[in-house]
Every structure is written in C-alpha cells, then in structure tokens.
Image (cartoon, coloured by chain):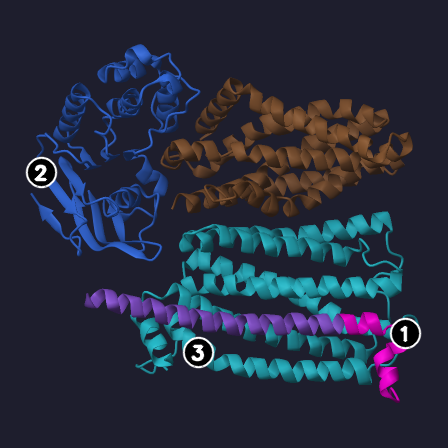
Amino acid sequence: MIRALGWVLRRDLLLAFRRRGDVVNALVFFVIVVSLFPLGVGPEASQLRNMAPGVLWVAALLACMLSLARLFAPDHQDGTLEQMLLAGEPLVVLVMGKVLSHWLMSGLPLVLIAPLLGLQFDLPADALVVLCVSLLIGTPVLSLIGAVGAALTLGVRGSGVLVALLVLPLFVPVLIFGAGSVGATAAGTGAEAHLLLLGGFLALALVLAPWASAAALRIAME
Amino acid sequence: MSKSGKFSLYYFSSPQSFYPLAGALQPWFAALAAVLCAAGLYISFFVAPTDAQQGESYRIIFIHVPAAWMSMFLYLVMGFWSGVGLVLNTRLSSMVATALAPTGALFTFIALWTGALWGKPTWGTWWVWDARLTSELILLFLYIGFMALQAAIDDQRRADKAGAVLALVGVINIPIIYFSVQWWSTLHQGASVSMKSAPTMAATMLLGMLIMALGFWMYSIAATLARVRCVILERERHTDWVAAEIGGQK
Amino acid sequence: MLEARRLECTRGDRRLFSDLSFSLNGGQLLRVAGANGSGKTSLLRIMCGLVSPSAGELRWQGRPIRAEREEYSRNLVFIGHLNALKDDLTALENLQIAAALGGMPADSGRMLSGLDRFGVAHCAELPAKVLSQGQRRRVALARLALTPAVPLWILDEPFSALDVGAVVELERLLASHLASGGMVVLTTHQEVQVVAHAILRVDLDLHSAALQAA
Amino acid sequence: MNWGNWQNFLAMGGYGLYVWGSYAVTLIVLIAEIVALVTRRRGVIEHLAKYYAARRRNDET
C-alpha cells in the first residue's frame, strides 16, 4: 500500500516536473491577486496590515481551487484514472498519493512565498511566522476538500465554475481560522487556539476526505 | 394497499407504490400547514405583546427563526435520504433528497431576507455579519451547489450519487461551519445585539415560533411530496405504470 | 471462473441489454459482438467492476465481484479504447508505472522485453505524445506481455490501429494466454484467428442478448 | 394584543415596512413555489402525454 502511494506520488511529481509551467502559473496567480489589493484599496500601511491575513488566505483559497482542475481531469481524459481504479490497491491510498502531490505542487509553494508577500503588507515578523504555519496546516485541508469537489465534477460540463461553487463554501472554516490566527498574532492575543483548531480540521479531513473522494471517483466512472 | 395486504416499508420504497401514497398524503400535510401557519400568524400578531426594547419589529422573528430552523433541518434530512440512497441504493430516497433541495434553499432565502429586514431597524444596516446570517448565507451556497451539481450531470444515477456524496460532506461540514462562524463573529464583535439574546424569550413567543416552525415543516413535507411526484413521473416515464397513470389523466 | 447472471444495463432512458447470462472458464475466449451503441463497452466496463449493472451480478470464482473489488481487480487486466498513456511520460515510464500500480515488479529489463514483443522497444525513451496512434496502442498492449499470470484479460477493440504484424503478435499472445488457462474477453470488428479451447460469443444485437456458443 | 384600528395594525409601531416586507416576501416566495410545483406537474403530464402519443405512433408504423 505504501509502495502504491509512493508510485502515485512519484508519477505525479514527475508529470508536474515535466509541466513545470502549470505549477509556476498557479504561483504567479497567487502573487498577482495579492498584489492587486493594495492597488485597489490604497497604500496606507495600517490598513494593509489589517487586511493582509484575509487577502493572503483568500488568494491561497483561489489559487488552490484553480489548480484542482489538474488533479483528476487529465487522468480521466487519457484513461489512466480508470487503470488506477483497477490497480488492485485501495483507491483511498491512491487518492491520498494524488492529494499529497497536489499539495506539494500547489500548497507548499504558497507557504514558501507567503512571507515575501506578507512583507509587502508590512506584517510584523511574528505574524509572518504564524502566517507560514497556518498555511502549512491549512493548505493540505484545502487540497483534501478540493479533491472531493474535483472528483464530483469530473467530466461534468462547466466543471470549472461548478467546482468553485461546491468547494469554496466548504473552505470557510479554514479561511476563518487561518486568517484568524494571523490576525490574532498581530493583535497580540496569541494564535495557539486557532492553529490547534486548524490541526483538528486537518485530522478530520485526512480521515474523511479521501474516502469521499474515492467514492466520488467511482461514481464519476459510471 | 398492496395486493397481498401486507404492509411493509419495502413496499413503499418503490416509486410505483409511493406515487399514489404521496398523492394521498400531500393534501393532508398542506391542510395542516395552512392551519398551523394561520395559528402561528394569529399568535405572532394578536397574542404576543409588543417588545419593550425593539417595539413591533421583533415580530419578524416569528418567521425568521422558524425559517432558519427549517433550512438547517431540511439540509440534514436531505443528507439523511442521500445517505440512505447511497448505502441501500434505493432510487426513491435519492429522489426525495433531490426534491428537498429547492424547498430548503427557499427557506434559507427567507431566513436571509427576513434577517436583513430585521437588521435594518435593529442595527441600522441591512446586512450584519452576524453568526446566524453568515451561516445561512453559506448554507444557501451549499444548497445551490447541490442543485447545480445535480443539474450539470446528465446521467441520472450518477447525479443522484454525486449529489448524495456532496450532501453528506455538507452535513459533516455544517456544524463545523456554524461553529467557526460563531467563533469568528464573537471575536470581531460585529453586532452588539445578537438575535438570540435580543428579546426575552416569553412563553407566548416561543409557542408562536414553535407553531410557525411546525407549519413550515408540514409545508415542506407537502411541497416535497408534490415535487417527488413530478420527479417520479419524469424518471419512470419508460415504465408501463406511468404510461397507464398518464393515460388515466387524460 | 467468471459468471454473469442476468445482467442488465441501462444508459439514461435506454435499456442497452438485459437478461444477459454467461460463464467463462479458463482457456476460453469471449467475444462480445454488436452494433455501435449496443453496449459492448458498457458490458466490458461492467465486467471490470468499473460500472455496476442496473440488475444482475457478476461472480468471480463463485463470489460476487462487488464484495471484493480490489481482490478481483488484481485478477484482471483491462485495456480500454483509451490507451491510458501519459503524454509527458516516456513509453518505458508509462509501462513501469502501470506495472508498479498493478503490483508487478517494475524493472526496466522486463519492460523493454514487453515493448520489444510489440516492436516498439526503440520508442522506449520517447515521450508518449510523439508516438503515432499505432505505436501508442502497441505500448498499451505491451502490458499484456508483462502480465501472463493475471488470469482475466478484458480488451476493448485491441486490434484497432494495429498493422498486420502487430495483429499477428497479439493473436499469438492471446493464444498462449488461453493455452496456459487464462481467459480473454474482447470486442473487435475483425475475425479473431485465435486457437482456443472454446470461443464464446455474446451478441448484444439480439434483443434478449442471448448467448450462443460457437 | 389589541391593535385598535387598521392603521395601527399596518403601521406596526413604525416598523410596518420591515414587518410587512418580511411577511409579504415569505408569502410570495411560498406561493411562487406552489405555483411552480403546479405548473411543473402540469408540464410533466402534458409532456409525457405527447411522449406516449409519439411512441404509439412509432409502434403503429
């Protein structure tokens, strides 16, 4: 089982490496969206500091959602997804592998670049650290929940908009506590509770989301 | 009803036998809904006294709160039937889930609308990011997502199952969303008057809300039964009994 | 032994076939025939366990395949009308990953011999996107050469896009699989020249979809 | 609760717009759903009648 997970991971990372452009594009999208906000609301530092957690997190949500189109759809089109269902390995494990690689290619880059963008918004150092930690815990939840949405909308017409409709409301708790943790640090009230709850969401999503995605994939194959 | 005279749940789990049953029950639920809503309206306008703090504007609560209850309750019911449909593979339960969604979305809309109208005189603004209103807004998105997903999938069986998975994911998420939003709104102290604490819960008020909620509940059952009957006819059109049923109508 | 009991398949409003029963034993080849849209591909997908039939059931070694999906999957190779190749991976990598996910050893020596069998060893290091339609089909079919021990092969139009040489090679491979007690299910437009213990034929055009043994 | 006269009842202590706005929209929405259900049922029956008629014609030819 671990072996199968390793192979899926290896395969998806190799594919992502051969199509580096897609990964870079999602990252550039994130940077552009975040950079647009100061242009929209003005350069006043205190206002930007207040907005920063929300803006960064919403942009992360959108970037993650955009990259969901690459999670299952290409495999569905060329028939490799079918073969995965027939691999004789538990589908949940294979889904885990795909979600993990999706996170490594879409979530992790955001975590790494977020501090730079935080500096643009004049966030203090401790808030930057919490921002990174919250993204590190929160973005895997986004990938896990997003996988369910991507699997449900597989091969459905207008799936791009539909996946946003299905997945974004489910992202709300992550957004609240992710952005909340950064805001709480900036306000000096401490972010431990927020981060713990985010960790709780991650645990819950890890347990439930792969099953739901696997079920949705089987349904999509019918 | 069955020819053998044997009553069983399995008998009614087939669309063919449920269709006439739904037709027979529907008027009764509709009548109950009308009576209960009339009683609820009477209490809310003629029995309940004026609130000392908010004046007459609090009478909106008699529909706002029951509608909010119903909207959440109907999503849970939808999730339940979805789960039954997914596990037992019974077509009828999926049809019921599909039929519940529009009515649930409607009550969500009513809760939002009345919330806004209550908010204007109370808070001085049409929209406040209060915990209940925000949760209702997200719930509306969940309902819309469910209906949009089902509408986008052509294959009926797949639409049923995909909708069921989504509804179940939503059911797990609703408490989490509700709790998160609650936490968030207390943190930001947006509204000083919360809807729950606003008027003291007088007994007559609670009674009015309960009766109204019961009325809405009966209405939801009646509307859902009517919609299930349409769905059954549409989906079972290749069967002989629907052909006979339509033939009998003409 | 694979046994189908009163299978029925509906797509939307249309009932593609119903009351379809047959059983397939080691050494037998089942050819699914029927006009376009008669449900050949649907039947194969049902037999793989990808789609559940609207009525009836499939049994593998006497047990319903629904109950032990993964176990059943390990006993079959499915090659659909899609070649299941990733454009950005080389032929060799594609084959390795397919084998590894199927629980086979993935050493490149075996992969190369499989590719060689279908005359595409020289394409091993090329990304799949530059291969021709026929070459891609050959790479997909090379999986069969790697999995002789898997008893049930389910092939959707395996001969499409193949030239004469590859057709002969595939027929030879099928024959040896059958001779060693394997089972083959396939759809094809051309007559199969396979010496088999028995060739069964399911014709979905017949309304009752009755089984004729030929 | 005694409102005295219709004016008082409609005015709702100055909150008439909000109270009646809520109740009216609720009523409108529920009635709209009922109307939609009735028309849907009618439409389905009509559509199916046509569908069966077409099928019968097909069978005859």
Residue C198 badge: 2
Query: In this picture, is B66 found above or below A2?
Result: below
Q: Which residue is mark 1?
A: D14
Kind of element beneath mark 1: helix
Q: Is residue D7 magenta?
A: yes
Crowd tier of the residue under label 3, counting other residues whose Cα lies within 10 Å: few below 14, some 14–19, many 20 or above:
some
Q: Quadrant of the N terminus of chain C?
A: top left
Picture quadrant where residue C48 is located: top left
CA gap between label 1 and label 3 equals 48 Å
Callout 1 amino acid: Gly
Kind of element beneath mark 2: strand
For this rendering, which residue is in front, B187 or A55? Answer: A55
Q: Is residue A81 magenta?
A: no
Residues at discs 1 and 2 in contact (Cβ within 8 Å): no
Kind of element beneath mark 3: helix
Q: Is residue C161 left or right of residue C104?
A: left
Q: Which chain is displayed in purple in the rendered image?
A: D
Q: Which residue is mark 3?
A: B21
The chain letter under disc 2 is C
Callout 2 amino acid: Ala
Q: Position of residue A129 (x, y in %)?
A: 79, 26
Residue A90 badge: none
Q: Which chain is displayed in blue in the rendered image?
A: C
Crowd tier of the residue under label 1, counting other residues whose Cα lies within 10 Å: few below 14, some 14–19, many 20 or above:
some
Q: Position of residue A142 (x, y in %)?
A: 63, 38
The chain letter under disc 1 is D
In this rendering, do the residues under marks 1 and 3 share a single chain?
no
The number of discs equals 3
Q: Is residue B68 left or right of residue C37?
A: right
Q: What residue sits 43% from the left and 44% below the top?
A: A220
